[in-house]
Image (tube, rainbow, N blue to C red):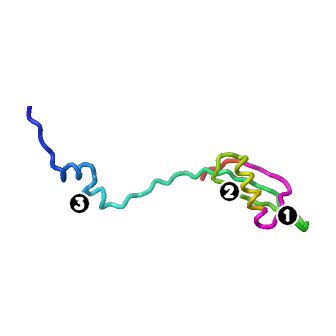
Amino acid sequence: MSTKQISEAEMREALGLSPSSPKESTPKEKAKRSTVYTLVELSVRQKTGGPAFRFEYRSRSISTLTARLEAEKAVRQQGLEVWAVLDIHQTSE
């Protein structure tokens, strides 16, 4: 039985770890992954009153409760108040 010894340089090239490797020289294209998010639609209005309008918030959370709480926090930070929750659903792009 004869076993062939592979040099370290040959092993690195076979694994694509050497700088002269053709795999490294070509630019890699990133696969476009679909983004999944939870869309929360709220009816909000100014704290002083006035007509209500739609407010949309995209949350990266898959939990609808967490997404709703994040949306309500964002509304309060803008000085608005939540009038009603219109819709909460998960969407992907």
Rendered location of residue 19, percent (x, y): 25, 60
Please, what is the three-letter code of the amino acid marked with disc 3? Ser
Please tell me which of labels 2 and 1 falls first in the chain.
1
**How many dots with numbers?**
3
For image coordinates 21% across by 48% down, the residue present is 11
Which class describes the residues within 10 Å of circle 1: few (<14), some (14-19), or many (20+)?
many
**Where 20 falls versus 36 (above or below)?**
below
Which class describes the residues within 10 Å of circle 3: few (<14), some (14-19), or many (20+)?
few
Rendered location of residue 13, percent (x, y): 23, 52
Q: Are marks 3 and 1 in contact (CB under 8 Å)?
A: no
Which class describes the residues within 10 Å of circle 2: few (<14), some (14-19), or many (20+)?
some
* Residue 83 belongs to magenta span: yes
Q: Which secondary structure lies at badge 1? A: strand
**Where 69 falls versus 50 (above or below)?**
above
For image coordinates 23% across by 60% down, the residue present is 20
Specify start and end residues of the magenta stretch as a single range.
Answer: 76-88
Rendered location of residue 82, percent (x, y): 83, 58
Q: In the rendered image, which quarter contains the N terminus?
A: top left
User: Quick check: 46 left or right of 71?
Assistant: right
The disc label shown at residue 20, or none = 3
* Mark 3 → mark 1, Cα distance in angstroms: 62 Å
Please give the residue where the numbered disc 2 appears in the rendered image: 58
Q: Can you name the residue that lies furthest to the left here?
A: 2
Which picture quadrant has residue 80? bottom right
The disc label shown at residue 45, or none = 1
Q: Which secondary structure lies at badge 3? A: loop
Rendered location of residue 43, percent (x, y): 82, 58
* Mark 2 → mark 1, Cα distance in angstroms: 19 Å
Please, what is the three-letter code of the amino acid marked with disc 1? Arg
